[in-house]
Image: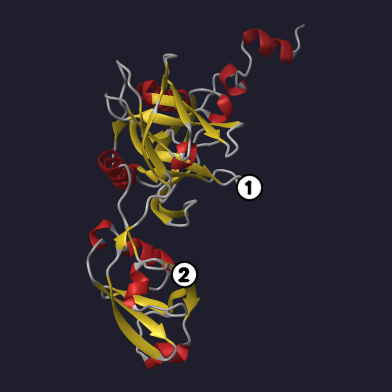
Amino acid sequence: MRTRVEQILNEGAGTDEREQRGTQAPGSDEALDAYSRVVVGAAEQVSPSVVNIEVGHRMKNGEQNLRGSGSGFVFTPDGFIMTNSHVVHGAGEISVTLPDGRQSGAQMIGDDPDTDLAVIRIVATNLAAALLGESTSLRVGQLVIAIGNPLGFQYSVTAGVVSAVGRSLRSESGRLIESVIQTDAALNPGNSGGPLVTSQGKVVGVNTAVITNAQGLCFAIAINTAKFVASNLIKYGRVRRSYIGVEGQDVQLDRRTVRGHDLSVERGVLVRSIMSGGPAGRSGMRAGDVIIGLDGVPIAGIDLLHKMLTEEKVGKTLVITVLRKSEKLMLAITPEESPIRR
């Protein structure tokens, strides 16, 4: 008599005992097949747009060429590709491999370390451009699919759900990236720059980071942020922002000071140093001042100050409010365009 193990192997490995008895839960096959069809369909729709990116970084001595890799996706038929800034920033050479095996050198259009996004371009024909969706319509629990090239394994697909929306993530430049998508779709080194897509095959995020000492904590830059950044990079080669030329840190205000000046904030930005010849220096600001307001908006920390310093503030004279010892001062300041990060 055959053993039970032999019976399972001969009749089909992994067959559930309930199925053998004809007692399988109703609809489970249909639900699994529907889920599979959705993931397969979205992956097949987007995969032709996903590329592998290889970069080379020349060392200062000019002898050693460090290599790196990541993912990206074509988002226009004429060869513009979205990826992460940390994938291509400072690269001496960029090479792109398309899903059909074609290879091409790529031109750097621009990168923005403040949002960890970059745009490169290749010259090639018959390119499949991914469809861009709307990240504002995402809901927690919604199915999403990540496509990329993790650890050198090309065109890998993982699926998960939107774990949270509206997260904030600190970029390598120190600025806070807003409206970040949290997902449990598995990401690994090499997935950076690849698309996060919906069940309809529309890109809603650019995969950017994973918390290495945790499970299921992965992040993507919202596609609405990426659209704004990409349009600026294509138009200007950079994202235009303003700056005032200070180095600062968040600081708690003394309660007596808050009450004495009837302040609406209990924290501010302590000015540690001032750039010589910059807007802050010309305004009369000094190291040791605490910034508590800009253009009538209370400033409770450096992240809000960064958020306020948009392109629209370039060349516009504003009033910046500072505390200097026991005094509250209103200074006129004219922000300038932020220098390009190299």
Three-letter code for the amino acid on which mark 2 is drawn: Gly
237 and 188: which is toward the camera: 237
341 w.r.t. 45: above or below: below
From the viewer's perspective, is residue 6 above or below residue 296? Answer: above
Residue positioned 45% across, 74% down in the render: 271
* Viewer-proximal residue among 134 and 316: 316
The residue that appears at 41% across and 26% down in the rendered structure is 50
Q: Residues within 10 Å of mark 1 (few under 14, many from 20)?
A: few
- The quarter of the picture where residue 246 lies is bottom left
Q: Observer-nearest residue: 251 or 199?
A: 251
Identify the residue shown where x is 40% and y is 34%: 195
Choose the circle earlier in sequence order: 1 or 2.
Answer: 1
Mark 1 is on which residue type? Answer: Asn
Q: Are marks 1 and 2 in contact (CB under 8 Å)?
A: no
Residue wearing tag 2? 248
- Above or below: residue 171 compared with residue 127: below
Color theme of the render: secondary structure
Residue 73 horizontal/vertical position (percent) = 38, 29
Q: Secondary structure at mark 1?
A: loop
Q: Is residue 272 left or right of residue 212?
A: left
Q: Is residue 319 left or right of residue 35?
A: left
> Position of 87 compared to 7: left or right?
left
Residue 113's spot in the image, x, y percent? 43, 48
Q: State the SS at label 2.
A: strand
Closer-to-camera residue (204/209)? 209
User: Which class describes the residues within 10 Å of circle 2: few (<14), some (14-19), or many (20+)?
Assistant: many
- Disc 1 versus disc 2: distance between alpha carbons? 30 Å
Residue at the (25%, 72%) spot, across then down: 318
User: Relative to residue 64, is residue 176 depicted above or below?
Assistant: below
Residue tagged 1: 213
> In which quadrant of the rendered view does residue 120 lie?
top left
